Amino acid sequence: TWSLSEGLLSVVHADRPKDVVWANFPHLSFLIAGHGQAVFSDKRGFFRVKENLQSLVREQVLESFQAEGESLTLTGSFIEEAGSLWEIKFSAIDDQQLSLTAHATLEGRPC
């Protein structure tokens, strides 16, 4: 569901529309992208990530959404970066699980 006045986007269960599966915080970005370097290390099953961000964009524009079967795809761009693109796809795995995949491109490079 989408409420422009509330700035709220939510994904609900098809058979139980009161059950919200995913939602953004009203009037706040739900996707952030950037470029940088990450160093991963692990010790006894615990993972540590050290990030050195070189660029970061925080304000996305939702340009389209398309429902197809059991999937919903959102696409848009970032205000701070001309030519940027992003896509989020929600897909029902079964009646209990939802898959979410996200892709973004800044400066012609994937994030």
Image (tube, rainbow, N blue to C red):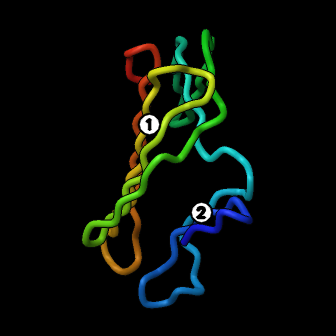
Q: Image check: 47 left or right of 7?
A: left
Spatial CA distance of label 1 from label 2 is 16 Å
The image quadrant where one finds the N terminus is bottom right
Query: Residue 73 sits in which quadrant?
Result: bottom left
At 65% from the left and 35% from the top, the residue drawn is: 59
Q: Which residue is mark 2?
A: 9
Of 16 and 83, nearer the camera is: 83
Instruction: Please provide percent x and percent y for residue 85.
Output: 43, 31
At 25% from the left and 72% from the top, the residue drawn is: 69
Query: Residue 49 sits in which quadrant?
Result: top right
Q: Image check: 50 left or right of 98?
A: right
The count of marks equals 2
Of 87 and 98, nearer the camera is: 87
Identify the secondary structure beneath mark 1.
Answer: strand
Identify the secondary structure beneath mark 2.
Answer: strand
At 59% from the left and 38% from the top, the residue drawn is: 60
From this view, report whether residue 2 is shown above or below residue 76.
Answer: below
Instruction: Please provide percent x and percent y for residue 62.
Output: 53, 47
Instruction: Please provide percent x and percent y for residue 89.
Output: 38, 53
Q: Seen from this angle, which residue lies furthest left? A: 69
Instruction: Please provide percent x and percent y for residue 37.
Output: 53, 11
Q: Which residue is mark 1?
A: 86
From this view, report whether residue 95 is shown above or below residue 102.
Answer: below
Crowd class of label 1 (few under 14; some 14 to 19; many from 20; radius 10 Å): many
The disc, 1 or 2, on the residue closer to the chain's N-terminal end is 2
Image disc number at residue 4: none
Of 59 and 50, nearer the camera is: 59
Residue type indicated by callout 2: Leu
Residue type indicated by callout 1: Trp
The image quadrant where one finds the C terminus is top left
At 31% from the left and 75% from the top, the residue drawn is: 94
